[in-house]
Image (tube, rainbow, N blue to C red):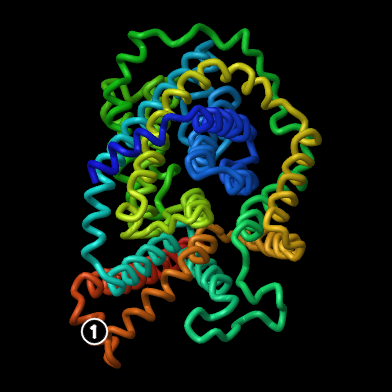
Amino acid sequence: MFEAFLQGFSLLLRIDTYVYIAIGLTVGMFVGAMPGLTTTLAVAVLLPISFKLEPMVGIPFLIGLTKGGIFGGSISAILVGIPGTGASIATTFDGPALTRQGKGRKALEMALVSSVTGDLISDVITLSLIGPIALLTLLIGPPEVFAIIIFSLILISSVSSESGIKGGIAAFLGLGLGFIGTDATTGATRLTFGLEALNGGIPLIPLIIGVFAVPEILAAVESRAARFIDEHVDMSKVGDRLRWHELRGSIRTILRSTLIGTGIGVVPGVGQVVAAFVGYSAAKRASKHPETFGKGELDGIAGPEAANNAVNGPTLVPMLTLGIPGDNITAILLGAFVAHGMRPGPQIFQEQGPLMYALLLSFVIANVIFLILGYFLIKPFAQAMQMKKAYLLPLILALAFVGALSTGDTSDIGIMVVVGLCSYVLRKAGFDLAPLIIAFVLAEPIEYTLSQSLLYAHGSPFHYLFVGRPIASFFLVAGLIWITWMTVRTIIRRRRSKGASA
């Protein structure tokens, strides 16, 4: 592992990697600053670009999009109280108040420094631990991987939205879509309904664009507002820059929230939004003057921004070592890794160790570029929030169609449109589509590990999984307990709500 780590440094000696990281960060910050557009949208639409590049360029480009997008959401959250992304909701508690006090620039720079610090430290922790974790995953077999995937999918489905039932339905839909095509074992086609275009399964790119990009484009069109925000932002009135003594006073908050975000990032399905709220709450509880929170407190910016960005690195741990994406972004990244010939899982660090460490090191270095770019781009992106939708939405739509055509099959356009319209209806019905895309990506490893487990079981799968493999049985039983608990909790909540309404 250490030799692979050292070899990874030599792969970093290329300028185009850092150029594309800078491009990704810039585009991500721009999209994140636009309320109504999300980081997931940017990554989904621009995913095909990464396929045309080498892995050492294409993957860091997508990471730059992610890092920039999460921070970009804090720009509108601070200046006008409208979170550009879900991860910036907690930032609206103190951001607008600081802006009204003439401290908007201080708040923006605190958000930038906190974001970069949280991201950098969590990336270093990830880089330090992912090798040993990868070695541990080599000790487990297909039954354990199958059980862990099932448990993770149950966890993601239950916490992805207010309704665990809707999350479960979305996951089943994703598995169904993932099983479409030709059975790798028997060679028989399944669930294709006689359509030759589906014999090879549903391609990843049009599915991702359809699930993530099309509903957001339709939602933006549905909103009749001409601009992303109607309020005028005057950057000449946002005050002075952040001073060192102000930053020094928030260092403990930043470090605390970084550890919180790092811990949350390892758990699939929790994500940046939860980390931001926990980071904010922890900062408020630890403060000597909690009464100032919500009224314009710099720690109220540092806490959530460090926490939500610290999630980025650790989410890669289950994705790279077990092939389990924890959220929308890592599901798309998993598809990008597979498209580049790198199938995440227990073997990836043995087979492609130098490349994997080079990629992880580029993520760490990206934070330095992030800090420099963010410092100079805050002002122009704050002004760009007032851009008319008519200028940007047609470009996004065009990129979506070009991306769907990147495979060269015109039928992918039809798949993207059908999936997009269905996804739009599901979002209107209150479904979170994260479990759908994650289940789709996991369908292949679920099928493979299950078939291998059944082969090892020699006709006694129940006894083999629940008695012969204690680690597998632990995760399967934990999944059943979690489903039972969530069901009981839902029933109790509904009875209480009925009693309260009566």
Nearer the observer, 495 or 406: 406
Determine the image quadrant of residue 412. Answer: bottom right
Q: Where residue 475 sits: x, y (%)?
A: 27, 69
Determine the image quadrant of residue 247. Answer: top left
Nearer the observer, 497 or 252: 252
Residue at image position (45%, 63%) is 157
Give the residue furthest to the bottom.
Answer: 459
Question: Mark 1 Cα within 10 Å, few/some/many (few <14, many 20+)?
Answer: some
Query: Is 225 left or right of 245, judged from the image as shown?
Result: right
Depicted 100 relative to depicted 80: above or below: above
Query: Is 209 left or right of 274, judged from the image as shown?
Result: right
Q: Amino acid at mark 1?
A: Tyr
Residue at image position (64%, 76%) is 199
Can the viewer see residue 199? Answer: yes
Depicted 331 relative to depicted 354: above or below: below
Can the viewer see residue 82? Answer: no
Query: Is 315 left or right of 100, judged from the image as shown?
Result: left
Q: Where residue 190 sits: x, y (%)?
A: 59, 83
Q: Where residue 143 sits: x, y (%)?
A: 29, 74
Depicted 295 relative to depicted 435: above or below: above
Residue at image position (23%, 80%) is 466
Nearer the observer, 280 or 199: 199
Name the residue tied to disc 1: 464
Residue at image position (30%, 93%) is 459
